[in-house]
């Protein structure tokens, strides 16, 4: 990779601006796991110069972390490991839980599954507004002091929530949804991150495959794949998003790039971002190099906005993914 990198406060080595997202590798909500392919995907990512992997305990209820821990045996030091905390589950039902006791339990489980004695970036997965942020922040700050965690991040937090949390512990990164079709953070989280020197780990940069350029209207989703109920993948809206992709391809062509490279480049050109590219097969990330070494100019940024406004009559955000609060 003609690697573009970014510094994350508290983490010694710079991170590649594309990180491997491993939700699908966990299997659940993505139609099942395939560990052999997952392991090859991690090998391929490292080979291509990606040095950051993002995961979470909830991805496959521990499975994603386990696969990563196994794949990284003997070379853990090469990678910036980002995982999360602050969700819990019972009988397969997920809910927010950032109580200190949950954090203390979860960190040990993550360290064990990841086969390591430290986590580079530990992110609160969703704000648990039933637990005072002070309690969550102080429990996490203790993990930083003990060396189990190098830096903290907040995912799916609003600026007001981040302000409250940051009174009690320093934060290095945020993790919101961000892609060509999900731009809500431009109103608040993105300017907040820029002002406060927080790196933005943009999740869903391919909008769950919609922006890969290979999604078709007749694609069948298997088993528990979340796209069976994702509102963007339901007609007639699905057709509007696919039409936008067709029109965006003309802009990608101007640069001699694929649609997928355009989607990733767009995220990288919008601020201090890292694109969390979700992949579960090695061939899916083969095009990493294509996203580096070029930039979208201002005129094409405007042309992209015009395509989105013309084609997507009935836009919808990623809110359907939000887990409930604790009972
Ligand atoms: P994504 O990166 O937008 O899309 C990933 C999906 O796109 C893949 O599973 C694959 O679907 C398809 N894809 C990827 N490369 C492709 C290629 N070359 N050709 C065709 N299709 C391709 O979505 P995401 O996994 O939801 O998000 C990325 C990461 O962000 C996650 O893995 C996770 O680490 C993080 N995330 C965090 C949160 C949070 O709340 N903090 C929420 C969501 C995601 P198929 O394999 O089905 O074809």
Image (cartoon, helix red, strand yellow):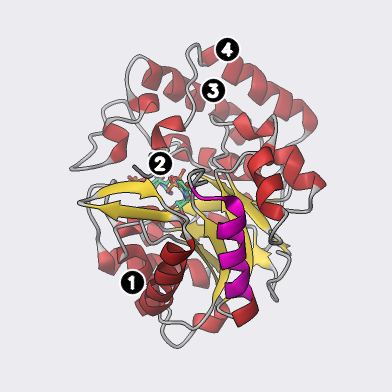
Give SS at disc 3: helix
Give SS at disc 1: helix
Q: Find the distance from the CA under tag 1 to the CA under tag 4.
A: 44 Å
Residue at (60, 15) in percent of width and height? 309
Q: Find the distance from the CA under tag 2 to the CA under tag 1.
A: 26 Å
User: Which numbered disc, 3 or 1, marks the residue closer to the eye?
Assistant: 1
Residue at (55, 43) in percent of width and height? 156
Q: Residues within 10 Å of mark 2 (few under 14, many from 20)?
A: some
On whether residue 72 falls in the magenta region, the answer is no
Instruction: Determine which quarter of the picture holds residue 10.
Output: bottom right
Q: Residue 325 bears which disc, if any?
A: 2
Mark 1 and mark 4 in contact? Answer it, CB < 8 Å.
Answer: no
Q: Residue 66 bears which disc, if any?
A: 1
Mark 4 and mark 3 in contact? Answer it, CB < 8 Å.
Answer: yes
| Disc with the residue nearer the chain's start (4 vs 2) | 4
Give SS at disc 4: helix
Location of the C terminus by quadrant is: top left
Name the residue carrying label 4. Answer: 310
Please state which of residues 289 and 195 is positioned toward the viewer in this rendering.
195
Given the current orientation, which residue lies at the most extreme right position?
195
């Amino acid at each position: 990779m003609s690697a573009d990198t970014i510094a994350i406060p508290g983490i010694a080595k710079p991170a590649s601006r594309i990180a491997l997202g491993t939700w699908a590798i966990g299997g659940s909500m993505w139609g099942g796991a395939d560990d052999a392919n997952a392991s090859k995907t991690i090998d391929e990512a490292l080979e291509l110069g990606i040095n950051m992997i993002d995961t979470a305990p909830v991805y496959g209820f521990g499975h994603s972390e386990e696969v990563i821990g196994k794949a990284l045996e003997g070379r853990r030091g090469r990678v910036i490991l980002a995982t999360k905390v602050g969700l819990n589950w019972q009988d397969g039902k997920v809910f927010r839980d950032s109580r200190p006791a949950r954090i203390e339990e979860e960190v040990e489980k993550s360290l064990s599954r990841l086969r390591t004695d430290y986590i580079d970036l530990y992110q609160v997965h969703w704000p648990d507004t039933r637990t005072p942020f002070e309690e969550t922040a102080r429990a996490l700050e203790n993990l930083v002091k003990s060396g189990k965690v190098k830096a903290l991040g907040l995912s799916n937090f609003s600026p007001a929530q981040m302000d409250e949390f940051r009174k009690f512990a320093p934060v290095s990164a945020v993790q919101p949804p961000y892609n060509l079709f999900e731009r809500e953070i431009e109103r608040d989280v993105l300017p907040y991150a820029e002002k406060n020197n927080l790196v933005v780990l943009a999740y869903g940069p391919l909008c769950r495959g919609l922006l890969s350029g290979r999604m078709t209207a007749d694609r069948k989703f298997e088993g528990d794949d979340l796209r069976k109920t994702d509102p963007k993948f339901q007609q007639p809206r699905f057709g509007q998003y696919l039409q936008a992709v067709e029109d965006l391809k003309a802009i990608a062509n101007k640069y001699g790039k694929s649609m997928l490279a355009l989607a990733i480049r767009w995220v990288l050109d919008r601020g201090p971002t890292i694109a969390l590219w979700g992949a579960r097969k090695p061939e899916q990330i083969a095009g990493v190099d294509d996203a580096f070494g070029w930039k979208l100019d201002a005129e094409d940024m405007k042309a992209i906005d015009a395509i989105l406004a013309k084609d997507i009559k009935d836009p919808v955000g990623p809110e359907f993914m939000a887990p409930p609060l604790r009972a």
